Amino acid sequence: MTDKNSSEYYNDYNSKIIKTIENFSRFGVIEDNIRKLFESGMLVPTIVQDSETNEVLMLAYSNLESFEKTIVSGYSNFYSRSRKKLWQKGETSGHVQKIVSIHSDCDNDTILFKVIQTGPACHTGHRSCFFNKLFP
């Protein structure tokens, strides 16, 4: 990618962020935090946690488009790195995640979805994807 193409890409991406953020304001989303999360154009690690028990259910990745779909729909949406496409959690299994709240960490480089989980969160059928104990 040449510097010109790279510059054009980031200008287009920043324009998309600005338009998306303007749409978020009607949902009460804090605009500056969203801008910081997605300004690099990278995928943002997204931790999913049960809103009642605080159990960590899974880790996935969000991009600006999946985040927007999450805000608008009220259900978790992610970007699949392996399939290279958006996906809504539970779209085939029915094990959806209703969003209760969304947070970012202190560095604004990780997202936390607090959810009401329907069924297991893990594709293996476990409640949480974190069932493999490593230590002690």
Image (cartoon, rainbow, N blue to C red):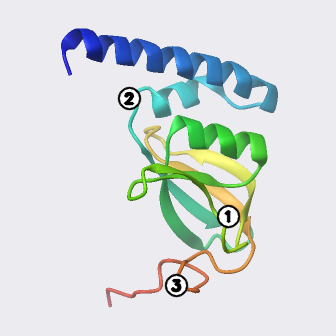
The percent position of residue 68, horizontal first and vertical second, equals 65, 37
Mark 2 lies on residue: 40
The percent position of residue 60, horizontal first and vertical second, equals 48, 59
Is label 1 in contact with label 3 (beta carbons under 8 Å)?
no
How many labels sit on residues?
A: 3
Mark 3 lies on residue: 124
The secondary element bearing badge 1 is classed as: loop
Above or below residue 119? Residue 48 is above
The percent position of residue 126, horizontal first and vertical second, equals 57, 86
The amino acid marked with disc number 2 is Ser
Q: How far apart, in angstroms, are the residues tagged by discs 1 and 2?
A: 28 Å
Q: How far apart, in angstroms, are the residues tagged by discs 3 and 2?
A: 33 Å
Looking at the image, the residue that sits furthest to the bottom is 136
Q: Nearer the viewer, residue 33 or 20?
A: 20
In terms of sequence position, does the residue under pointer 1 or pointer 3 come before the other? 1
Packing grade of label 3 (10 A; few <14, some 14-19, many >=20) is: few
The amino acid marked with disc number 3 is Thr
Q: How far apart, in angstroms, are the residues tagged by discs 1 and 3?
A: 15 Å
Q: Quadrant of residue 116?
A: bottom right
Mark 1 lies on residue: 91
Q: Residue at x 56, y 30 (%)?
A: 33
